[in-house]
Structure formats: structure tokens, C-alpha cells
Image (cartoon, grey):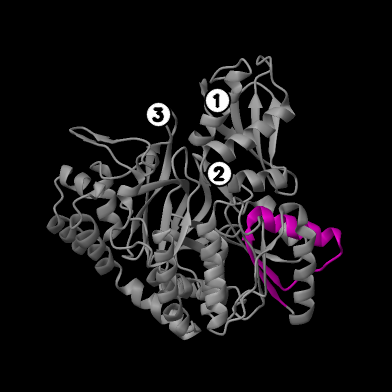
Amino acid sequence: MPGQLGQLVRLGLGLPGFLREPVTAAGAAEQLRRLLAAREARFLDVARRLIYGHPGSPYRALLRWAGCAYADLEAGVRRDGIETTLRRLRAAGVYVRLAEFKGRAAIARPGLALQVRAADFDNPQVGGRGVEGTTSGGRGAPTRIAYDWELMREHAATEFVLNHVHGVERSPLVLWLPTPPSIAGIHYLLLSTKARRPPVRWFSQVGTAIDPLLSRTRLGLEFVLAGCRLLGHRVPRPEPTGPQDAARVADFLAAAKAAHGACLLRTYASSAVRAARAAVERGHDLRGCVMLTGGEPLTGRRRAAIEKSGATACSRYSATETGLIAGACGEPRSADDMHLYMERLALVSAPLASRPGGPALDVFLFTTLCPHMGKILFNTDIGDFGVVEERACGCDFGKLGMTVHLREVRSYDKLSTEGMSLLAVELHEVIAALVEAAGGGPDDYQFWESEDEAGLPRLVIAVSPRVPGLDETSFRGAMLAGIGRVLKGGDLAARIWRDAGSLEVVRADPVLLREKHLPLVRDPRR
């Protein structure tokens, strides 16, 4: 209880200062321009204070093992720039794999064996000075991430420019995002309130607490809502609206568009598809509405399904560990063409094995440039890969100098459905026990990532017909119960997946690729 009260006190002390100065178009652009101009200085400041100056940092041990003192790092950056220096260090073995970052594996290099925990990558100077969220966790406690108020100010500037790029900075905002412990909904509530455009409605895929024991998150939410109102901001209370209730969201979007000529919806890609499909079924024309989607890839099929309603679909890319990563380009060359937020992150891609014995992928390695992020990253793999391009464009992000574009972003070891992501290796711990109880073995099942004709995601568990004692319906129920019970933090995903009907169990032999049994593949039926 003292820790909980302390967090509420820190929230109360920081909230008025965060909301005091509104975000403006000129101010947001100037802030991003200034931060971009200071990229090298910010990177070196983070390295000096939060890595080399922090004895417990795993990155410090890696850099020392590679023979890279701070003076060497600084000289390399001054001479060659951030990204070239990071690539050289990656080639020398200075990087962190996803399993290492999650504390599931030791950092092992020739002559170096370093036992690590997920908490070892925390920013030692950030903790409780802002809003907290959690990752999905695993068999231990879910990883708690602190969003410093200074980081939130940077996020607010970036989001204002993103809204301006797509012409919706003054449009009524609707959220369809979950409440805490997910940080997504409260994050965008605060960013939009700072821009003096708080959401007019907040639909939530789950209620305000999915577990009566989550008193901390419930109190935190109530505290933020009350604080915003005391400061004069009209903010909505979240309304439980499951995936099956998409018509409710579609009706409100149509009404807001009719009243104002435009509307902005922030939600997950799959939820946007559901809202758009409901709008079509109910005869609504959503031309003038923009759906900014995240949580899952905005595939061509999903974008087409959204645009059937008349709405415009735009993609975002974020992760709890990093905050905002990229936002949709104003002059896109593909369905999910996004600008990397270069003022806060550096990115290089490099071939890494997705798992022992698995294929090598050109995964994203992120590095922190912002000293206010809850996690410190230095050539760190968070489980994603995709296409990286460097080119100029004429949208506001391009004019500011954000020249790195990302597209076709996918995860190699995270299963993302209805905006909820869990590590595949953690899901395997649940499924393997169920398959074994039914008389099967570790090679008798496989995850298939799929989507239906409308672009709605499906997570298919293919179980070999050789497994004798398995009933598909009972197996699906047991899997959802196991996710919520065994994976702490998985209860949110289990609730949403159950409501959306996103899980499918089929009797089929796992697919072999290059004579190898891979635990996660694309649906071979499509």
C-alpha cells in the first residue's frame, strides 16, 4: 500500500505540470526539430550517464567486453554517426537478443557469461515519475514500464505532428483502447488532453478492472480522470465495449462525422476492421473519418476492409518497452509506410536467429536516444523485423528530417491478435502441457498466424490428428484459462481473445519448412 500511495502522489504532483502548457503546431514542430538536431548529443548523454555510469547495466558489461570505452564510443559517433557506430558494435557482438532482454536467457558471448533479469534494463533514473504500464509478462510478474512525464511531453509533440500530417488535429477523437493495466488508453487520453482535444468518447475492449485484485490500476485510472477534471478538462470515463460490440463504435463515428464532418478513431487494427465492417453493415458512410491503427500490422487486406466504409486507414507502431516508434507517412508508398521517430530512437537491422536452430531474420535493433524512457535499449531486439528504407518525402515528418521509413513490420516471436501480444515461447509453455495431457508431444502442434477475408486476425492452433484425447472446444477453453492463470498479465489478452472469438483449433499436422518443425508459421491454408 505505501508504494501504491507513493505512485498516486507522484501522479498528482506531475499531472498539473504536464497539462499546464498545451501542445501547438508551431511548438510541436520546433520541439521535434530541436531534438533531431541534438540526436548525437542525446545518444552520448544516455550512454555516458545511463550505461557507462551505471555499474549494473548489462550494456556496460557488453561494451567493456568488446573493448569499447566511452571515449571510443564518442569518437566513433563524432566520426561516423550513430547508426554506423551501432552497426560496427553489432558486428563486434554488442547487442541484446529478445530472450536476453526479457531475462529468459543469459547474455553469452565468447569469454562472457552474464546472468540478467528484465529489470536490469530499466532506466535507473526513471521510476514512478509518470504513468505506468505493463507488458504481458510471463510465468513471473509482468514487466512494469514507467513513462516519465518528460517522455510523455515528447510523445505529445510527435502525436500532434502525426495528427497534423493526416489533417485530424482538430477532429473529434474517439478511443477504442483498453483501460489499465494496458497503458494504451490512458496514454492517448493524456496526450490528447495536453493538445486540448481530449477524446469525446472512450470505448474500452474490457472493463475498468479485469481482476478485482488490480486495485492499483483502478485507483490510478480514477486518480488521472479526477485530476484532469479538477484541472478543467472534460475527459470521458471508459465504457466497456467488447469486440462483439463494434456496431456501437460505428454508430458513434457516423454521428460524430455527421455533426463535425470528420472524426478520428485510435484503436487496434483488428478493432478498426470490426468498426468499419459494422459501419458498412449498418449503411454508414465514414468518409472524412481517419482510423489510426496499431497493435497489429495494417496489412493490405485490413486497409481495404477499413476503406470500404469510406474511412482512411493509417498505421502506427509502438511497443510498451519503447513507447511510440513510428507513425504513418503523409505520402505513403505502401499500406503501412511509417516514419521512424528518429528524435528518440536509432535503428539498425541485423541478421539474428529468431530461436536456436531457427532461420536468421533481419531483426530490428533499437537504441535509446531519450534519457526519459523507462527501458534503456542499445542494439536491442524487441522481437520485430521488417523493411527499412531511407528516403526523403514531402510530408511534415520528412520536412523535419525524419528520413527513415519502416513498412511490413512483423513479429517473429510474438503472437498479436486483437491488439494483444504475448511471446510465443510463453504460449508454448501453456499449450505444451495441454497437448501432453491429451497424449501428444512437443512436435504435435503448431501456431498458425492467419486472417479472414475481412482482415480480422485469427490465431490457429494446429494439433496433429495423431493426438487421441483432444476435443477442440474444450482445448480452446482450457488454453484461454491457462493464458489467464499461468501467464501473469495474460488475463487481459485471454479476455479479449475470448470475446472476439479469435482462437481456432484445427486438427492438422504441423507444417515443415526446410525439413524443420517451426513453432510459428503463416497459415498454410491461405
Q: Do the numbered discs 1 and 2 sit on residues whose CB atoms are within 8 Å?
A: no
The amino acid marked with disc number 1 is Ala
The amino acid marked with disc number 3 is Pro
Give the residue pinned by disc 1: 432
Give the residue pinned by disc 3: 356
Kindly tell me whether residue 98 is visible in this rendering.
yes
The amino acid marked with disc number 2 is Gly
First of labels 1, 3 by sequence position: 3
Q: How far is mark 1 from mark 3, CA to CA?
A: 18 Å
Give the residue pinned by disc 2: 490
> For the residue carrying disc 1, how many other residues have a C-alpha within 10 Å: few (<14), some (14-19), or many (20+)?
some
Return the residue nearer the eye: 327 or 229: 229
Start-end of magenta stretch: 262-291
Q: Circle 2 sits in a helix, a strand or a loop, which is it?
A: helix
Residue 371: image x %, image y %? Answer: 31, 65
Q: Residue at x 18, y 55 (%)?
A: 52
